[in-house]
């Protein structure tokens, strides 16, 4: 008969095999190796990459706050000097190398704008100035402001001023037009003989012949149409498309076949999603434009047709 040692073996257990194994481990105070793996020791003395990044971020934040404090103190000191009258002002602005202000063209156009603005304000404030000089100076200034914003791309600095000057010129032109209608004068008579200077104008009718003339040579209605059209183009550049369409409509009220207004009104119609009206305007321009001056009508009509196909 085999004797059993009580110290080495435990009494028999009627539990399942896995439960019996855990039970024996608990009795012998042995940790199961699969349940309790040994964790690696954490070395707190060793710096990690995360800690380095955190420390670098803290240093950057500290430097930024110190820099802001220095700027605030400098601003307070400069304000104090200005308040006491000890600061020497400098009218020159800082021009960065890549900014539009650093170019020679920008400086030339700013000088030209200052000259035209001076002429316009002088003719406007002078009660003895002729009416023609007043509206021609306004149109010249507004046209140059619009041209400047199309050349210098800095967010349309002079668009609102151009719109205001255009409205001033239109008010003067409309008053002159009403006086000529009341006196029975011809409002479509240019100041020069168009056919002798521009023989190609014989292919066009009504006010379209004055598209080749400069502003002083145009008739009153020709100036009204050209000014309304340029005002509408300025509205278009300012993303005011509904106002652009209204200004084109006012131009076409004087001449329904004015090709410049029809072409660019169609562009505004495309932006507004009015493709049928844009197609009609482009078709009319292509019928009248025998010399293909307005090439935008061809590309615009192609855009209208492709947009209709996508619908």
Image (spheres, grey):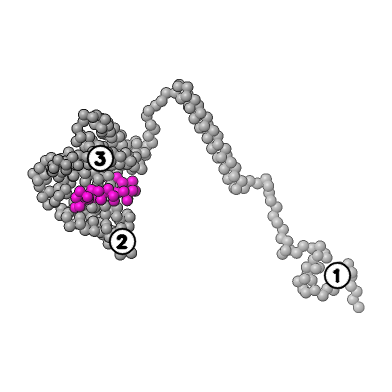
Judge whether 47 appears above or below 5 on screen. Answer: above
- The residue mark sitting in front, 1 or 3, is 3
Based on the picture, tell me whether residue 171 belongs to the magenta stretch: no
Where is mark 3, residue-wise?
Answer: 171
Q: Nearer the viewer, residue 10 or 306?
A: 306
Q: Which mark is residue 307?
A: 2
Residue drawn at (63%, 46%), measured in percent from left and top? 47
* Location of residue 69 by image quarter: top right
Q: Where does the image place residue 229, in percent across and percent down from the top left?
A: 24, 47
* Location of residue 62 by image quarter: top right
Labels 1 and 3: the sequence-earlier one: 1
Where is mark 1, residue-wise?
Answer: 10
Drawn side of residue 107 relative to residue 179, left or right: right
Q: Tell me if mark 3 has few (under 14), some (14-19) or many (20+) residues whose alpha carbon lies within 10 angstroms of its own.
A: some
Judge whether 30 appears above or below 78 on screen. Answer: below
Judge whether 259 appears above or below 94 on screen. Answer: below
Q: Where does the image place residue 255, in percent across and percent down from the top left?
A: 19, 50
Do callouts 1 and 2 mark residues in contact (Cβ within 8 Å)? Answer: no
Q: CA distance from mark 1 to mark 3?
A: 115 Å
Labels 1 and 2: the sequence-earlier one: 1
Q: Nearer the viewer, residue 7 or 187?
A: 187
Drawn side of residue 142 relative to residue 26, left or right: left
Residue 162 appears in view:
no
Which range is magenta?
Answer: 233-261
Quarter containing the C terminus: bottom left
Q: Where does the image place residue 162, in percent across and percent down from the top left?
A: 30, 40
Residue drawn at (61%, 46%), measured in percent from left and top? 51
């Amino acid at each position: 008969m085999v004797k059993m040692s009580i110290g080495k073996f435990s009494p028999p257990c009627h539990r399942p095999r896995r439960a019996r194994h855990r039970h024996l481990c608990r009795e012998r105070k042995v940790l199961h190796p699969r349940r309790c793996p040994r964790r690696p020791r954490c070395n707190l003395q060793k710096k990690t990459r995360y800690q380095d990044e955190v420390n670098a971020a803290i240093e950057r934040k500290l430097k930024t706050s110190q820099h802001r404090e220095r700027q605030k103190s400098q601003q307070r000191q400069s304000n104090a000097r200005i308040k006491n009258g000890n600061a020497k002002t400098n009218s020159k602005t800082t021009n960065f190398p890549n900014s539009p202000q650093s170019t020679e063209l920008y400086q030339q156009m700013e000088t030209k704008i200052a000259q035209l603005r001076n002429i316009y304000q002088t003719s406007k404030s002078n009660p003895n100035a002729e009416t023609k000089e007043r509206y021609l100076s306004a149109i010249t200034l507004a046209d140059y402001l619009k041209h400047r914003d199309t050349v210098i791309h800095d967010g349309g600095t002079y668009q609102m001023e151009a719109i205001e000057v255009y409205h001033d010129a239109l008010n003067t032109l409309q008053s002159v037009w009403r006086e000529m209608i009341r006196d029975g004068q011809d409002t479509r008579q240019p100041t020069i003989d168009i056919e002798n200077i521009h023989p190609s104008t014989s292919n066009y009718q009504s006010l379209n012949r004055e598209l080749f003339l400069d502003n002083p040579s145009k008739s009153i209605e020709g100036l009204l149409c050209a000014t309304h059209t340029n005002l509408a183009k300025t509205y278009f550049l300012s993303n005011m498309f509904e106002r652009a369409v209204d200004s084109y409509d006012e131009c076409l009220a004087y001449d329904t076949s004015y090709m410049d207004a029809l072409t660019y009104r169609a562009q505004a119609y495309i932006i507004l999603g009015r493709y049928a009206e844009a197609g009609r305007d482009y078709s009319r321009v292509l019928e009248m434009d025998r010399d293909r001056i307005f090439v935008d009508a061809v590309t615009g009509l192609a855009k209208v047709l492709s947009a209709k196909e996508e619908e």
